[in-house]
Amino acid sequence: MRIIDLIIKKKRGGVLSKEEIDFFISGYVSEDIPDYQVSSLLMAIYFQGMNKQETTDLTMAMVNSGDKIDLSSINGIKVDKHSTGGVADTATLIVGPLVAAAGGMVAKMSGRGLGHTGGTLDKLESIPGLNISQTMERFAEIVNTCGVSVVGQTGNLVPADKKLYALRDVTGTVDNVSLISGSVMSKKLASGSDKIVLDVKTGSGAFMKDVEGAVELAKMMVDIGTLSGKETVALVTDMNQPLGNAVGNALEVIEAIEILGGKHEGDLKTVSCALASKMLILGGIFSSEAEAMAKINEVINNGEALNRFGQMIEMQGGNSEVINNTGLLAAADSIIEVKAEKDGYIQSMNTENMGMVALLLGAGRTKKTDVVDPAVGYWLKKRIGDSVSKGDVLADFYVNDKKNLEESISLFKNSVIIGNNQGKKIDLIYDTIS
């Protein structure tokens, strides 16, 4: 078998066999196939596409390229959750404790963020003492004890995806449904959970800008999960404005604590509860949305959801007192009010640029070696559809280093569009794919 034959076959619209895909992935990981030939094959795939079976075979070849996590020592049905990403998407910190408090089991491996704010691990590391690096034995012990643990991925989990993604990033082949699906689902399938719930974002702050594209991506990933023997459900949700009000690592932890403690409503809570409900149903804890949502509301109101978050923090070496005193988290030197310059309604937001605002403030990283400042970011005071008067506070900026402050404020103001009409209400959950 030769890689050049696979390139020509796919260039002409042919369907690659499982054996051919296995050959391509194993040869690339072992460095027997060079970057320039893989780049050519990726471009052929980009233009010709892959069918469901090809995409599933690609995903499984990537899964088999490295470690596979064995979660059999953890009791019950383990349900994983994955978001395709967006601004102020703090759902993992809320969903995990909610599911655990309602009787489910969440053993989650997360990554770090490249972009506007840190990833889930960076948010957790803003909690004093919390350690995201745990042995598999300790990971299992934490989940068996309190129902939830979120840790870092192992070093050799899906190495094919690491190599392929780096190459796609510099060859213009990132935005292909099959390649995206394979990247996401290979990590989920290798992580060992029994079932999977996906949150596929769409809108100005999402990778998939239109609903149709997001639905196509969701269907492909659900198909991969199903063909791989793992029941998978996807929600297609909105990212035309930041999901939560807090944008920045410690700030997002504060918002998660407020939601788990029943002190905060809004879009982030709504989406988190919807995801938790799906996870509880897939996990066999409840048979209907009504039952699951009733239990979710109960564990928020009686304090059990917040207590589970505290238990997880403590078992991972962190100071669990943060759930009662968020002042223990890193605090910025100054808080600056950013105000509206005219009357009207918030009509829309450029959410991608609003993520860049947080990056300018120091809340994210553009390369892996960048240091994230856990204290900085901003807290939205207005959302799409809200009326504003000139001088109203649109957001509080939490600032340490002021070198990019003027640029970040200018970008924020240009990203929040104020007009005379209230505009159409945005749907929060567009579709459910199962």
Image (cartoon, rainbow, N blue to C red):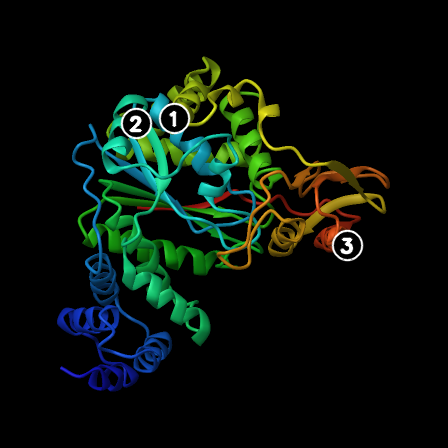
Give the mark nearest the N terminus, 2 or 3: 2
Quarter-wise, where is residue 244 in the image? top right
Mark 2: amino acid: Ile
Task: Give the alpha-carbon distance from disc 1 to disc 3, as whole Å.
Answer: 39 Å
Give the mark nearest the N terminus, 1 or 3: 1
Q: On residue 410, which mark appears?
A: 3
Mark 1: amino acid: Met
Look at the picture and state if 380 lies above or below 321.
below
Which residue is identified by label 2?
Answer: 142
Quarter-wise, where is residue 415 in the image? bottom right
Residue 264 seen in this snapshot: no
Which residue is identified by label 1?
Answer: 312
Q: Nearer the viewer, mark 2 or mark 3?
A: 2
Question: Residue 106: percent from the left, percent from the top?
Answer: 31, 33
Question: Residue 209: percent from the left, percent from the top?
Answer: 52, 59
Task: Give the alpha-carbon distance from disc 2 to disc 3, as whole Å.
Answer: 45 Å
Q: Residue at x 31, y 26 (%)?
A: 147
Q: Nearer the viewer, residue 301 or 118?
A: 118
Q: Nearer the viewer, mark 1 or mark 3?
A: 1
Q: Residue at x 21, y 52 (%)?
A: 67
Q: Nearer the viewer, residue 96 or 71?
A: 71
Give the mark nearest the N terminus, 2 or 1: 2
Q: Secondary structure at mark 1?
A: helix
